[in-house]
Structures are given as structure tokens and as C-alpha cells.
Image (spheres, helix red, strand yellow):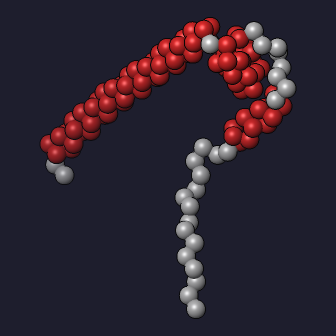
């Protein structure tokens, strides 16, 4: 390659790196925007559920049962629940089991029946 070709290549690589940084920034902003929207949806849904629980005693009891069963110990004070739920041991075990699963599993190999 001539010097001009090397210079042109270097300029293109530099431009590529700049574009990749810009794309990464756009992706990060989009991901942050989605996270904020998801949080907002959860807050709105939670407010609706809590408001409905104020007017429907049967729903309030069901919600209380669900909270008692599924709220983690570290969050129980947010709902005025006792510090440890009866199912806490099972939930901790289940949480630890899920956390222990590798994030990326090897690809599954389909088993094909062997011929005669």
C-alpha cells in the first residue's frame, strides 16, 4: 500500500471509531430511557393497585397475602410487614438457585436418533 492508502485507511478507522462511540452513546441513552419508562409503569401500576386496595377489602386481603409471600426481607418494612416472612427461607433458596444459573448457557445440541 502506498502512504496515501495508509493515510486514507487510518482516517477511515478513526471515523469508524467515532461513529461506533456515537452509536454506543445512542444505545445507552435508549436503554436508560426504556429503564425509566419501565420504572414509571411500575409506579403507576403500583399506585392503581394500592388505591384499589383502599376501596375493595377482598382485593386488599389478596394483595396483603401476595405481599406477605413474595416481598423480600429487605423490602418488608416498606409495606409494614413483619421483618421475616414464613416463606422467607424458601424465597431465599429460590433466589439463590436462580442467581446460581449461568447467564449464558452453552448452545443446546439436538439429539438425533441413531440409525438402525
Examine the image and state in which quarter residue 34 appears: top left
Q: Position of residue 91 (x, y in %)?
A: 77, 32
Q: Position of residue 65 (x, y in %)?
A: 73, 22
56 up-or-down from 16: above or below: above
Q: Is residue 12 left or right of residue 42?
A: left
- Relative depth, front residue between 16 and 53: 53
Work out which residue is located at the far bottom of the displayed protein and give it. Answer: 116
- Residue at point 58% right, 56% down? 106
Q: Position of residue 115 (x, y in %)?
A: 56, 87
Q: Is residue 51 left or right of residue 27?
A: right
Q: Is residue 52 left or right of residue 11?
A: right
Count of numbered circles in the view = 0
Q: Position of residue 23 (x, y in %)?
A: 32, 30
Examine the image and state in which quarter residue 100 appears: top right
Examine the image and state in which quarter residue 93 appears: top right
Residue 50, visible in the rendered structure: no
- Residue at point 54% right, 11% down? 47
- Residue at point 60% right, 8% down? 55
- Residue at point 37% right, 25% down? 30
- Relative depth, front residue between 40 and 26: 40
- Relative depth, front residue between 59 and 96: 59
- Relative depth, front residue between 2 and 62: 62
Residue 59, visible in the rendered structure: yes
Amino acid at each position: 500500500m502506498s502512504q496515501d492508502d495508509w493515510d486514507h485507511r487510518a482516517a477511515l478507522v478513526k471515523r469508524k471509531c467515532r461513529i461506533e462511540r456515537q452509536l454506543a452513546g445512542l444505545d445507552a441513552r435508549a436503554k436508560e430511557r426504556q429503564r425509566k419508562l419501565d420504572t414509571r409503569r411500575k409506579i403507576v401500576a403500583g399506585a392503581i393497585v394500592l388505591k384499589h386496595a383502599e376501596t375493595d377489602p377482598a382485593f386488599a386481603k389478596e394483595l396483603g397475602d401476595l405481599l406477605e409471600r413474595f416481598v423480600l426481607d429487605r423490602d418488608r418494612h416498606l409495606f409494614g410487614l413483619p421483618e421475616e416472612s414464613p416463606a422467607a427461607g424458601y424465597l431465599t433458596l429460590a433466589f439463590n438457585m436462580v442467581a446460581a444459573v449461568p447467564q449464558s448457557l452453552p448452545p443446546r445440541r439436538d439429539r438425533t436418533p441413531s440409525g438402525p
